[in-house]
């Protein structure tokens, strides 16, 4: 239903124009907005602004008459309904009015009741127009959804091991897809990262739009395309064996080019092409080879198209000495060499794309675990791993989709570890941070090395060694010395009892405080107070 029906009254006679607006109850007729224009040119400006559903216009006007106005308006607003006002002598305009599909032709002098009837008729026509558009839109949506379902059903059956070919042929013919039993076919799989499925909920870009882009890109040949999973599209197409490879590459490049028109910069695709087969009953074999090739995503990465090859190439086998080299580079803090080793390993593995993916992931899992262990020895603790560090790491590494993602993760971690170690060992900022914390929290009787280690994300043992190296004292010695010095200030206040002074500097046991005080100063707290007062 139209939310707001707008009407424009156009007449160069002010009395007629104002009289119509004043003496007709427009709301009762279903019109919610009424505006006026004093001539044809003024009417064009108002129409462009309010986009009226109905125009009630005089025919004879200076400059731009009613017929010319209606013709101009209809160019921009083809559904706008026109009602003409005319004198008896304007009959020559009747034919033009009919050609413009005018709703009515009201003669002057104007009969208000006649105008009301004409407006009612125009309002009803506007409502019918809106209902028809809504019905067509809904029908289009239903048709699109049904087509998607039918295409998905056709593809699912064609790639199945026991395809009902005759039934599929009938469905294909009904959809005007000209596949014949003995044609050559190719199966294409277009996949994208499962984490990017949410992009298809974008108002500018959705699954139907993606299928449309793919259909346009493969328009050079008969084909059918549909989703067979949340992140996988299968295309079955007629193939000309001699030219198919170059055409498929061009089609994939066109898809990527079209995607750039939308906000989908990180919507990366990977395309695999199965073996070309003859006969509709062999499509399942072509699909199987395309699916096998899908495993190559790990080695090639996204934004690539890969064709099936029946290769017997040997898989990659790791020289176990690489772990010793990596351990040496880490222990000797040779960051460039450690990074170079991972880069070289990645290049070597990429040459052997028949290697089982889990075998490769296990290699990187072990190297990453080595890095984590060496980092902890040097006081860099990866708290993200928690207690079940090995399980955490394996889940993380096995979750990567490509070799490049794993390589980037490990190199990033290597760089982070070396940077953190450098900060810890050269700047002294960690020790400074610990000292500041002690100075603010000395009254906390539970203050400990573990609390301080957690503060700076180090192990207690490593922090203790680092603190001793920087200050020449242990953390415990520093805490005691600071507390005793601070207590001297409290002892100057004679109103405070000794147990209150002890508690103020973090000692719950006044006797223990007194012993610590005498050990450092040679005096008991009471002797120090007396000496100060004297």
Image: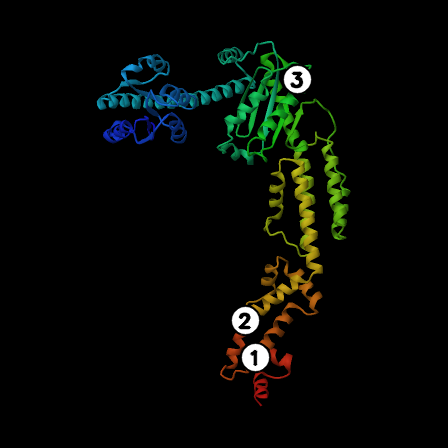
Considering only vertical position in the picture, is 5 above or below 514? Answer: above
Between 213 and 424, the one nearer to me in the picture: 213
Quadrant in the picture for residue 136: top left
Is residue 48 found left or right of 473 in the rendered image? Answer: left
Closer to the eye: label 3 or 1: 3
Q: Secondary structure at mark 3?
A: helix
Packing grade of label 1 (10 A; few <14, some 14-19, many >=20) is few
Q: Position of residue 16 (x, y in %)?
A: 27, 27
Q: Which residue is mark 3?
A: 244
Q: Position of residue 31 (x, y in %)?
A: 29, 29
Between 448 and 74, the one nearer to me in the picture: 74
Q: Secondary structure at mark 2?
A: loop
Instruction: Please state, as top left, top right, bottom left or bottom right, where the N terminus lies in the image.
Output: top left
Q: Which residue is mark 1?
A: 489
Residue at 57% in and 70% down: 442
Is residue 320 found left or right of 524 in the rendered image? Answer: right
User: Mark 3 or mark 1, which has the lower sequence index?
Assistant: 3
Closer to the eye: label 3 or 2: 3
Residue at 35% in and 12% down: 95
Residue at 54% in and 19% down: 155
Q: Which residue is mark 2?
A: 443
Give the residue at the far front of this rendering.
Answer: 62
Cα gap from disc 3 to disc 1, whole angstroms = 89 Å
């Amino acid at each position: 239903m139209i939310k707001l029906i707008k009407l424009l009254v156009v007449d160069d006679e002010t009395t007629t124009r104002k009289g119509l607006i004043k003496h007709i109850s427009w709301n009762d007729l279903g019109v919610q907005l009424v505006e006026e224009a004093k001539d044809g040119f003024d009417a064009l400006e108002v129409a462009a602004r309010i986009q009226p559903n109905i125009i009630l216009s005089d025919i004879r006007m200076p400059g731009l008459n009613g017929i010319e106005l209606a013709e101009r308006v209809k160019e921009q607003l083809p559904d706008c309904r026109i009602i003409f006002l005319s004198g008896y002598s304007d009959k020559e305009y009747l034919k033009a009015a009919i050609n413009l599909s005018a709703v009515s032709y009201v003669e002057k002098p104007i009969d208000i009741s006649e105008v009301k009837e004409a407006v009612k008729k125009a309002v009803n026509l506007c409502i019918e127009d809106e209902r028809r558009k809504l019905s067509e839109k809904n029908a289009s949506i239903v048709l699109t959804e049904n087509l998607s379902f039918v295409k998905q059903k056709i593809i699912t059956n064609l790639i199945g091991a026991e395809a009902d070919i005759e039934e599929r042929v009938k469905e294909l013919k009904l959809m005007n897809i000209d596949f014949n039993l003995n044609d050559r076919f190719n199966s294409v799989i277009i996949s994208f990262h499962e984490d990017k499925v949410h992009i298809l909920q974008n108002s500018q870009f959705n699954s139907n739009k993606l299928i449309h882009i793919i259909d346009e890109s493969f328009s050079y040949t008969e084909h059918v395309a549909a989703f067979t999973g949340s992140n996988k599209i299968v295309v079955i197409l007629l193939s000309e064996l001699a030219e198919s490879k170059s055409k498929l590459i061009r089609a994939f490049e066109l898809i990527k080019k079209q995607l750039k028109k939308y906000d989908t910069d990180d919507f990366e695709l990977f395309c695999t092409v199965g073996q070309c087969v003859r006969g509709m009953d062999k499509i399942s074999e072509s699909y199987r080879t395309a699916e096998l090739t899908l495993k190559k995503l790990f080695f090639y990465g996204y934004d690539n198209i890969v064709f099936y090859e029946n290769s017997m190439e040997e898989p990659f086998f790791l020289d176990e000495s690489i772990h010793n080299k990596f351990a040496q580079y880490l222990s000797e803090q040779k960051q460039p060499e450690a990074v170079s080793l991972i880069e070289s390993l990645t290049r070597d593995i990429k040459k052997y794309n028949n290697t089982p993916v889990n075998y490769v992931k296990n290699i990187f899992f072990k190297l990453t675990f080595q890095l984590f262990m060496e980092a902890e020895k040097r006081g860099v603790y990866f708290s993200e791993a928690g207690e079940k560090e090995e399980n955490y790491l394996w889940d993380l590494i096995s979750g990567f989709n490509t070799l490049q993602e794993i390589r980037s993760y490990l190199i990033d971690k290597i760089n982070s570890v070396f940077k953190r170690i450098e900060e810890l060992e050269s700047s002294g900022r960690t020790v400074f941070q610990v000292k500041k914390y002690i100075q603010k929290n000395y009254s906390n009787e539970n203050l400990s090395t573990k609390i301080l280690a957690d503060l700076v994300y180090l192990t207690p043992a490593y922090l203790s060694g680092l603190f001793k190296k920087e200050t020449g004292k242990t953390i415990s010695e520093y805490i005691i010395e600071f507390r005793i010095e601070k207590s001297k200030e409290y002892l100057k206040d004679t109103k405070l009892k000794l147990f209150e002074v002890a508690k103020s500097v973090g000692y719950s046991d006044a006797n223990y405080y007194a012993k610590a005080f005498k050990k450092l100063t040679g005096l008991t707290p009471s002797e120090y107070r007396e000496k100060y007062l004297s």
